[in-house]
Image (cartoon, rainbow, N blue to C red):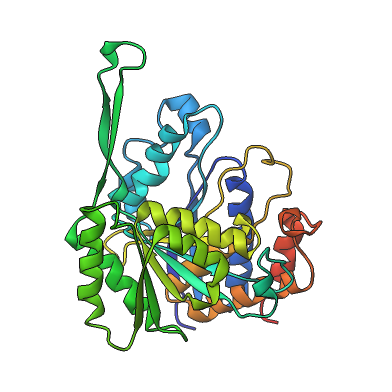
Amino acid sequence: MDDPQRFRIAAIPADGVGREVVAAGRAVLDAVEANAGGRFALEWEEFPWGSDYYAEHGAMMPEDGLEVLRGFDAIYFGAVGWPTVPDHVSLWGLRLRVCQNFDQWANVRPVAFLPGVTSPLRKADDTPLDWVVVRENSEGEYAGIGGRNLAARGDGGEVAVQSALFTEVGCERIIRFAFDLARTRAVKKVSSVTKSNAQQYGMVLWDEVFRRVAADYPDVETESVLVDAMSAKFVLRPEDLSVVVASNLHADILSDLGSALAGSLGLAASANLNPERRFPSMFEPVHGSAPDIAGQGVCNPVGAIGSAAMMLDHLGLHDEAKAVHRAVEAATAQGVKTRDVGGTAGTAAVTEAVIANLGV
C-alpha cells in the first residue's frame, strides 16, 4: 500500500464551548480517517492558547505562536472570549492575529438549511434555500485603523476614530473569489453588498471594482444591493441568493443573520482561507464561546463539524468532506439535535449520531 497522505493540523480549542466542539469535530475526523483505509492521516497538535493562557502569561498566545503555526497544513479553531478578558483583547490577541498575519483574506460562511431543523422562515418549509456568504477578511471595517484621543480634556471630551480601509487589490481579490465560487454552483449569481449611498469613498471603490470584475464573468448573474435592503432580502427573498459578497463588517452581520434563519448560530461553519496557500488556512464555527453553557455538554457541535468538513475539502479530501455533510444531514433528519434547534440531545449524542451515519 502507498504511504498515506499526511496532514499536520493545529488544534486551538481556546475558550468556553470551543473546547467541547473542537473535541467533537476531532472525534468525527478520527472516524473519517479510520474509514479511509489508510489513504490519509491527520497528525494533530493541540495548543492551550486563549483566555486561560492570558491569565497566566498576559498574552492570548506566545510571541512565536505564528511561527509555530506556519508549518501546519491547516488550523482547527474553537471559539475565543471569556468574561475575565476584554473582548477586544481576546479577539485581536488570538483569532484576528492569526487571520491577519496569515492573510486569510477570504472568509466563507455557508448558510445551510438542514433536514429536521425548523427555520423561523415559513418559506423554508417548501422552498429550497442554499446560499453562501463570502466575507472580505483582511481589511474593511476591521482593519484596526484609528485611535482614542483628547482624554485629557476631561470627562466627555474624548474622541474615538475607527476608520475602514478599502484597497483596490483587497476588493478585487475577494470579489473575483466570489465569482469563481459562483461558477461552481447550480445558481451562478453573485450579489454584492454595498452602502455607497452613505459611504462615498470606500464603498464607491467597492462598487466600481465589482462592476469591472463582473465584466470578466458574463456567464454569472449579478446584482448590487444596499446592506439594509440585503438584510430584508435575507428574510423576504432568500431564494434569490446564491453567493453574497460583502465587506468585513457587513458580511459578519449578514452571515449571522443567515445562520439564525437556518435555525441557530450553532449550525454555522466557516473557513478563513489564504487561497494562495502561502499560509495555513483556519476553520472554525461561527458561534462564540458561550460562557453561560460552557462545560455543560449541551452545545451544538454541528458548526464545528461542518467546519471540519470544509477543512477536509481544502485539503483535497473532497469525498470525505461530502461524507461528513451527508452524515450531519442524516443525524438531524433522525431528530438527533441539541436544544438550540429544538432537540434534547447533548453534544456527545449529536457527535455519536454523525459518526454513526458516516458512510451510510
Q: Quadrant of the C terminus?
A: bottom right
Q: Quadrant of residue 33?
A: bottom right
Residue at (35, 51) in percent of width and height: 99
Left or right of residue 47, residue 36 in this image:
right
Q: Position of residue 160 (x, y in %)?
A: 30, 29
Q: Quadrant of residue 356?
A: bottom right
Disc tally is 0
Identify which residue, 197 or 241, lies in the foreground: 197
Residue at (60, 55) in percent of width and height: 265
Left or right of residue 15, residue 314 in this image:
left
Identify which residue, 205 or 354, lies in the foreground: 205
Residue at (54, 62) in percent of width and height: 258
Q: Position of residue 185 (x, y in %)?
A: 44, 83
Q: Is any atom of residue 308 visible in this view?
A: no
Identify which residue, 83 or 327, lies in the foreground: 83
Q: Residue furthest right?
A: 344
From this view, report whether residue 133 is shown above or below residue 357: above
Residue at (47, 70) in percent of width and height: 132
Q: Is any atom of residue 81 visible in this view?
A: yes
